[in-house]
Image: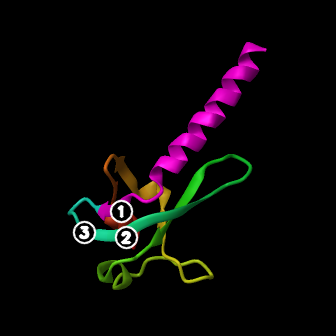
Amino acid sequence: MAESTNIMEDKKNEKRFSRSLLGKTVVSKAGKRFGETSDLSFDTKTGELIHIILKNPTGYCEGLEVEKDKDGRFLIPYSSVLAIGDFIVVAEEDII
């Protein structure tokens, strides 16, 4: 039963971590601002984060060839994330 408890605790920690990303400003290594985290997309089977969905995209972000969803929201691949702290730092070369 202890292993089951650990799995449930891991799931709670993942949810807490995911929520902490919402509202954070997304910037490139060079400090270029892309926008703020509005939501996250993830694989429902594995729980793997796929994209950061932006709100309030900047003019800089709009000028790039950033992938968009069917609703026109900008999608930043989670695989491009380099660091998470006060900001989410992404590798711009992995986005465009």
Question: For the residue labelled by badge 1, is the local secondary structure a helix, a strand or a loop?
Answer: strand
What x and y, as percent, mark residue 81? 40, 54
Depth check, front residue: 65 or 27: 27
What x and y, as percent, mark residue 65? 41, 81
Q: Amino acid at mark 3?
A: Lys
Question: Which residue is located at x 55 percent, y 63 percent?
Answer: 39
Question: Is residue 28 covered in magenta?
Answer: no
Residue annotated with mark 3: 32
Q: Amino acid at mark 2?
A: Gly
Question: Is residue 9 covered in magenta?
Answer: yes
* Labels 2 & 1 near each other (Cβ < 8 A): yes
Q: Residues within 10 Å of mark 2 (few under 14, many from 20)?
A: many
Q: Residues within 10 Å of mark 3 (few under 14, many from 20)?
A: some
Depth check, front residue: 94 or 6: 6
Question: For the residue labelled by badge 2, is the local secondary structure a helix, a strand or a loop?
Answer: strand
Residue annotated with mark 2: 35
Question: Which residue is located at x 48 percent, y 62 percent?
Answer: 77
Above or below, 19 relative to 9: below
What x and y, as percent, mark residue 46? 69, 46
Q: Earlier in the sequence, mark 1 or mark 3?
A: 1
Q: Quadrant of the C terminus?
A: bottom left
Question: Which residue is located at x 36 percent, y 81 percent?
Answer: 64
Question: Which residue is located at x 37 percent, y 83 percent?
Answer: 62
Q: Amino acid at mark 1?
A: Val
Q: Quadrant of the N terminus?
A: top right
Tell me if I can see residue 52 in this picture: no
Gap in Å between the C-alphas at discs 2 and 1? 6 Å
State the extent of the magenta-drawn residues as a range.
1-27
Residue 26 marker: 1
Tell me if I can see residue 79 in this picture: yes
Q: Residues within 10 Å of mark 1 (few under 14, many from 20)?
A: many
Gap in Å between the C-alphas at discs 1 and 3? 9 Å
